[in-house]
Image (cartoon, rainbow, N blue to C red):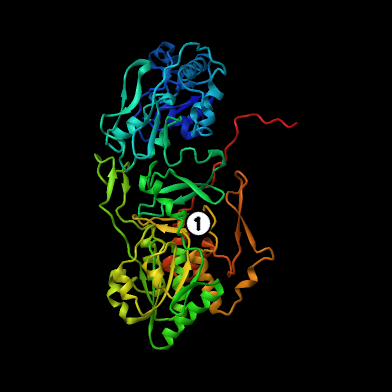
Amino acid sequence: MPSITINGERHEFTPGEKILQVANRAGQEIPQYCYHPGLSIPAQCRICLAEVWAPNPRNNNKLEPLMGGKLLPTCATECSDGMVVYTNSPKAVANQKAVMEYLLINHPIDCAVCDQAGECFLQDYSYRYGRGVSRFEEQKVKNPKKDIGEHILLYSDRCILCTRCVRFAWEVSQTSELMIAGRGNKSEIDVFPGVGFDNELSGNVVDLCPVGALLDKDFLFKQRVWFLKQTPSIDGLTASGDNIFIEHNEGKVYRVKPRQNMNVNKWWITDEVRYGWKFVHAPDRLRSPMRRQYGVQVEADYTRAYDEAIAGLRRARDAGGRVALVVSPMLPCEEAYRLAEFALAIDPEAALAVGPVPFAGEDRHYPPSVPADDPAAFHVSAEKAPNARGVRRVLAAITGRPAVEFDDLAPRLGEFAAVVVTGNYPSAWATEELASALSGKFLVVIDTLPNLLTEQADVVLPGATWAEKAGTFENRRNMLQAFEAAIPVVPMAKTEGQIANDLLAVLGGEDLRRFIPRTGVLVVDEGPGQVPAATEVTNIPRAKLFNAAEVRAEMARAHSELDVFVSEITLPTGRTEIEADMTMVEL
């Protein structure tokens, strides 16, 4: 293969690749602001300029400087075989220092109050490539702060006009709300008059902005980024299966950001996924088991709630009735498997059904101008459940027949004497028709938020959201993707997998209190190897701790149809270690 040499290191390349692309792929740093692999290349910021030498075929392939020694933008210059590139030569270094000086001429020194501090390219490059002093003595140009959309604030003073946001609005969302207004040092990013920046991908410009110019209103002044822990996860709201990072601290989620996966969501996520996690910390989260006593729901401990749930299900079965289990498509595959095991342990003829699968609108893709099957297309799913396909796969394997769809089960609910229902939807989902159909039956509900079913249930068990558990989702393209728990479950609630483990243990005669340590408190480390921060949670009675990876292996051993949970599953990438720029000296 052809190769080039960058700062003394030789790298192979594919014809058509740019110098900067080769360097990025090889992990060799070249400073860059305007370049992004998902956008066009304007060569706008000029900090990536380098000396480029190449063989001259007219002079016996002797190495000669291109363009007479003029510095060339590595982001826009195609590689050629034998090319030699210097970004550390005196001329290239002088350019880097000059560009940094120009960018900082009108930039306010407000890092102490800027939300971007700690993940700002301008800070990093000022330290690595800047002069360290300012020679500017004139009046700085002042630009206003602007509210440009539902989610975005624009601090024009901090903008370096890299144009990433403008190109995103024109090339990806193709809604074209952003532009560069003015000329010279009066140039600034702005929206067209009367047109707010409110498309469904708007939050991505915050991730694109290399400085603190575009900020997220939802995250503004909420947390310093160096306190945040980052957990790889999967979109738990839609069937798209977008790869995300959940960023959290001390048991609280602060923001969700996209995690690059070229086979799924590229570099982007929708605002629905970015801001849809608020129900995780809803003030009305279910936090304690409930049982019905003399027709009224009262709080109960887990051992009493489990005993009553099992007793009620057994009474229904012994009286000749049947048991049904409704597994929510919001639950991961491993929890669906355990809950199905419990239902079949109570009633071997139990009906196992997939819960309601919500839809909103139609499937969409971006950029809208490319075909839906284009490899560069980013898809937005109208199906608002992350794992309907995974639940169907698990229930079909464990019963040996296709899973029952909720729409087929609903008209037949009169056939059942007892029903176990799981929810975990981000908003109210139970209809009056469903509540009426379940009236008079022994009803066990496992859910996270109150609704019509939790109000009429005989036993209510508080569950956990996807951010509080580990598991596997199967997306709209039938990709199985595993994810990790980001934060501990809210106090007194449990994951559905743990609840299923507990119920199976109680059926087997185990004493759940044997796992409680003397302290009664469990310490959960949110981010091993990151900023130290542990959260204490009350250690309530439980059986063996639910472990998603162990359950996946068990599923594959027990059912050949579920081998894919070992052979084809995509595991989250490891955490990236961040090294400090500062030299540490032991005293």
Residue 372 x/y as whole percent: 26, 46
Quadrant hosting residue 540? bottom right
Q: Is residue 373 visible?
A: no
Is 198 rendered above or below residue 264?
above
- Which residue type does callout 1 highlight? Glu
Q: Residue furthest bottom?
A: 319
> In the rendered image, which quarter contains the N terminus?
top left
Q: Residue furthest right?
A: 587
Front residue of this view, candidates 22 and 534: 534
Quadrant hosting residue 325? bottom left
Front residue of this view, candidates 232 and 308: 308
> Which residue is at 46% across, 41% downward?
219
> Which residue is at 40% across, 41% downward?
267
* Residue at the spot of label 1: 468
Quadrant hosting residue 32? top left
Residue 406 x/y as whole percent: 31, 69
Q: Is residue 247 visible?
A: yes
- Label 1, residues with CA under 10 Å away: few <14, some 14-19, many ≥20: some
Residue 452 x/y as whole percent: 36, 68
SS under mark 1: helix
Is 552 rendered above or below residue 322?
above
Front residue of this view, candidates 402 and 493: 493
